[in-house]
Amino acid sequence: MLKNKPLFITATDTGVGKTITTCVLGALLQNQGHDVGVMKPVQSAGDDAQFLKKSLGLEDDLKDINPYYAPEPLSPHWALKRAKIKFNIKHLQACLKKLQSRHEVVLIEGAGGLMVPLKDFYYNADLIADLKADLIIVARLGLGTLNHTLLTINEARRRGLKIKGLVFCQTSKASLGLPEKRNPSDIVKLSGIKLIGIIPYLKSFNRKNILRQCKNLKFKL
């Protein structure tokens, strides 16, 4: 089985569509004939890992998909600390290795952006390096995304992380104004990073609807 580097999906901010993007990219890869696994290393409240497991029809143990879960919707370093859960990178590496033994490629959804701490002085950016993953950056379409996205790109480059591409996600059904229409092309021009595509607002996450509405995304291994 062909082994690819894991792909880490990070974001410029919270609520910009990381889980949706992970689901969409997973469905597209499956439709191309790839065996796809997912991982949500740290989850603070919510059901992202369960959603991805169900949406992509995966049989992996949820404890391997989501090794660390804390019940409060807080920054991971606080959520884990308050739940008295000790973060251990070696445990995450072991879970990823197990998933990689079962799948051709593993999509890893991070918790927040690059500089979200998972424990004191250890950030998502450090985790990406330790998992030897390539990076996909998810951004919102609207006003403010130029600053957030370019800052994220610059920090990733400063740390020597390889960026595979950018995804913009329309998280509401509001009509698109000039910023939403211009921002993706402006960021590509200013950064030189490849645009994977724009995910439109999705009312349904069934496979047929995802493949129909997201067929224009240029995403291949």
Image (cartoon, rainbow, N blue to C red):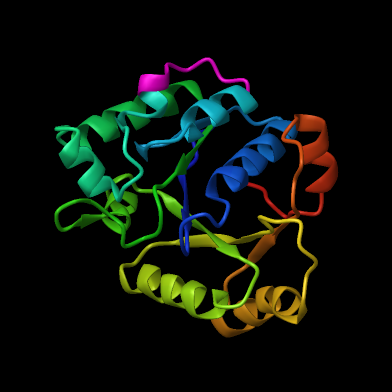
**Residue under the image location 56 percent in, 64 percent down:** 139
Work out whether residue 71 or residue 145 is closer to the camera in this orientation and state it. Answer: 71
Judge left or right: residue 106 versus residue 200: left
Snapshot quadrant of residue 99: top left
Can you name the residue that lies furthest to the right here?
Answer: 212
Count of numbered circles on the image: 0
Please provide percent x and percent y for residue 202: 75, 45
Q: Is residue 87 visible?
A: no
Residue 36 image offset from top left, x and y in percent: 57, 30
Rendered position, 28 above or below 1: below
**Residue 28 forms part of the magenta stretch:** no
Q: Quadrant of the N terminus?
A: top right
Examine the residues drawn in magenta and state their main secondary structure: loop
Question: Is residue 169 left or right of 76 when viewed as pictured?
Answer: right
Residue 28 in view: yes
Which residues are drawn in magenta? 57-63
Picture quadrant where residue 79 is located: top left
* Placement of 52 over or under 170, stated as above or below: above
- Residue 60: % across, % down: 47, 17
Q: Nearer the viewer, residue 34 or 51?
A: 51
**In this view, 63 is above or below 10:** above
Which residue corresponds to the image point at 71% horizontal and 30% vertical from the top-left?
33
Taking the image as shown, residue 204 lies to the left or right of residue 14, namely: right
Residue lying at 15% horizontally and 58% vertically, measured from the top left: 121
**Spot occupied by residue 111 in the image (x, y as percentages of width and height):** 39, 48
| Placement of 57 over or under 218, stated as above or below | above
